[in-house]
Image (tube, coloured by chain):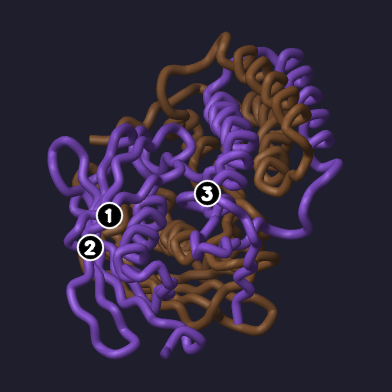
Chain colours: A brown, B purple
Amino acid sequence: MLEFTTEDLSAEDIERLRAIYEPLAISVRELVDATIRTEVDAETVAAVKADIDAATARLRSDQIDGAFGVRRTASGQSISWGNAVIGLRNASAPPLVIHRDEDGRRWTDFHLGAAYEGPPGHVHGGVSALVLDHVLGEAASPDGKPRFTGSITVRYLRACPLGPLHAEAQITRVDGVKTFASGYISDAEGITVEAEGVFITPRWLRD
Amino acid sequence: MLEFTTEDLSAEDIERLRAIYEPLAISVRELVDATIRTEVDAETVAAVKADIDAATARLRSDQIDGAFGVRRTASGQSISWGNAVIGLRNASAPPLVIHRDEDGRRWTDFHLGAAYEGPPGHVHGGVSALVLDHVLGEAASPDGKPRFTGSITVRYLRACPLGPLHAEAQITRVDGVKTFASGYISDAEGITVEAEGVFITPRWLRD
């Protein structure tokens, strides 16, 4: 059983915490990119590394045990700020901002830079799978209650360039505890990768 | 056509560059983790953010355009230091170190922390897909020449906990330009996620 923690946070509390921690993650995301692309000399790298170690030590002087988790507010809002895809405190996440149309379709416009590379100048195939797993999973959970991936198949139509991208997904069918969803990633030229998946309602949500 | 660049780097050059840049990425990886987990106050966060912005500016004072790419040395070694899964200069990558058995099986022991979370305390399903896409792709490329994912199916047997994990993959069949591979991720209790994929030899490598 997964532990979703509940905290009595108001909308104002959440906004206050977001204003503190989100700008830090945005800066660290830039640093991740610069760390891949820099060509400065060994001395400069060593000096920068020392500054970063000092910064990390200050942050770690008061930190939670383990990962961020998923925290639910008393009003039912879900806070996944550590999430590998949408976590706004996670500098490894793009992070995706998922939108919802009235017809249940989920979509996101996002940008993938140097940290998401596989083939030269192109998105790692596994990163496309990561994005699609998340977007299909959100589409399969229209009531805000989580469904977990049972299986997903990802088909690569052509190499997906780094840069601005779009992803979307929707439910195709529901059969008991199984929700089927499909979706794709596209660039300005059209679809690059498509996926379909089966998402399972966990036992403890089956009323 | 993908641009693999060739550089006349000796083994000593590569080791020297690795010694400069790898420790920086290791430090930034720790910072990514601390950024998710810290609970220090707003003033400390703002001070740390300013230090990080300064560090990023120093690194960016001399940097390549775009992503790292894949650089081949004159001796045929492939350097993918920006890669999203194995890139030793990519703080968003775990990074995986892939081993090769004599029978062609590829395997890796790795650790996933707070930056790879999906469900509370557990690996994001998409991160498992990312890892498996990469490990199967390496298994499908035994001659060191890249094969690209045509399609991959990932099946989730149970939730995969954050922490120490193992992944492995091997070729199951070759049919012309298609190489089939399968593999899995396991924790101490056994297999959590399994995958099978079809990997395609790119046109420009077909004879």
Q: Which of marks 3 and 2 is in front?
A: 2
Q: Please tell me which of labels 3 and 1 falls first in the chain.
A: 3
Which residue carries the number 2 mark?
A: B104
Most foreground residue, B202 or B30: B202
Residue at the far top in the pictured view: A61
- Chain containing mark 1: B
Label 2 vs label 1: CA separation?
6 Å
Is A113 above or below relative to A18? below
Judge left or right: residue A176 versus residue A117: left
As helix, strand or loop, the secondary structure at mark 3 comes to loop
For the N terminus of chain A, the image quarter is: top left
Is A31 above or below relative to B65? above
Q: Which x, y percent locates residue B52?
A: 75, 28
Q: Are marks 2 and 1 in contact (CB under 8 Å)?
A: yes
As helix, strand or loop, the secondary structure at mark 2 comes to loop
Q: What residue type is labelled 2?
A: Gly
Judge left or right: residue B183 versus residue A122: left
Which residue carries the number 1 mark?
A: B100
As helix, strand or loop, the secondary structure at mark 1 comes to strand
Most foreground residue, B3 or A202: B3
Q: Which residue is drawn at 68% across and 13% down?
A: B41
Is A119 above or below relative to B150? above
Q: Which residue is drawn at 31% across and 70% down?
A: B140
Q: Residue at x 72, y 14 (%)?
A: B44
